[in-house]
Image (cartoon, coloured by chain):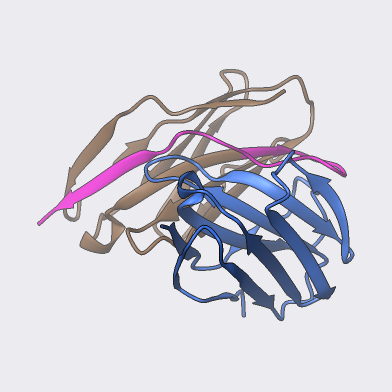
Chain colours: A blue, B brown
Amino acid sequence: DTEVTQTPKHLVMGMTNKKSLKCEQHMGHRAMYWYKQKAKKPPELMFVYSYEKLSINESVPSRFSPECPNSSLLNLHLHALQPEDSALYLCASSQYPLAGEYEQYFGPGTRLTVT
Amino acid sequence: AQKITQTQPGMFVQEKEAVTLDCTYDTSDQSYGLFWYKQPSSGEMIFLIYQGSYDEQNATEGRYSLNFQKARKSANLVISASQLGDSAMYFCAMRPTGANSKLTFGKGITLSVRP
């Protein structure tokens, strides 16, 4: 089973709202990732969790707050977002953190619209 | 730093024919992994195939094969017997082997399969 699940599938939120994106994997992977993807562009790395600890933050604005409650779950808390934050947010996992020979498996993404 | 180049703006192929999607890369690392992902309009990034830089044989996975030419730094994806469901955006990506390395994506190629 190489499934990464994400909820919700779609999210529309106002600039003053607080919402959370959720990601789950049951493959025993020890690395989990958040990416942001704009239309017709490649994904951009936001955060990496390695063994449940934040190991990389790609200078993401503080209105995005990641959380890894356990090895299977990854959350992205959203607060006071801007319309330009509207994008597809992809979660991924891999067996070992950032080791080049291990593929990342992606979830179906959450399409976020900020109004 | 790594760079992935995908220059084909859009590709068209007739159903049941083979198609090659080009990818060149630039890196100073000696050991790295090369990946191809497929992204249908639904948004999910689907892992297709992996090639290690020290692998002597070209990788194959069903209808997908990777034409790896290390000296030319190219890693082209070949899809045989195209199907309508192959219509999608395809991303080439690479990551150095070892800890704390990031996956670098090319800008992607749109493939359309004609019936």
Residue A63, horizontal then vertical, whole percent: 68, 53
Residue A33 colored in magenta in the image: no
Give coordinates of residue B10: x percent, y percent: 26, 35
What residue appears at the point 79 percent right and 26 percent down from the top-left corner? B30
Q: Residue furthest front?
A: A16
Classify residue B99 as left or right of residue B50. right
Identify the residue at horizontal 41%, vertical 60% (top origin): B43
Q: Nearer the viewer, residue B28 or A115?
A: A115
Tell me if B27 is positioned left or right of B99 in this view.
left
Q: Residue at x 70, y 35 (%)?
A: B53
List x then y, in percent, for residue A97: 82, 55
Residue range in magenta is B94-115
Image position of A112 with respect to B59: above or below: below
Residue placed at 46% from the left, 73% from the top? A9
Depth check: give the residue in front, A72 or A100.
Answer: A72
Of residues A72 and A11, the one drawn nearer to the viewer in this rendering: A11
Count of residue discs: 0
Q: Position of residue A81 (x, y in %)?
A: 56, 53
Between residue B25 and residue A73, name the one nearer to us. Answer: A73
Figure check: B65 above or below A1: above
Q: Is residue B7 left or right of residue B45?
A: left
Residue A21 placement: quadrant = bottom right
Identify the image quadrant of the N terminus of chain A.
Answer: bottom right
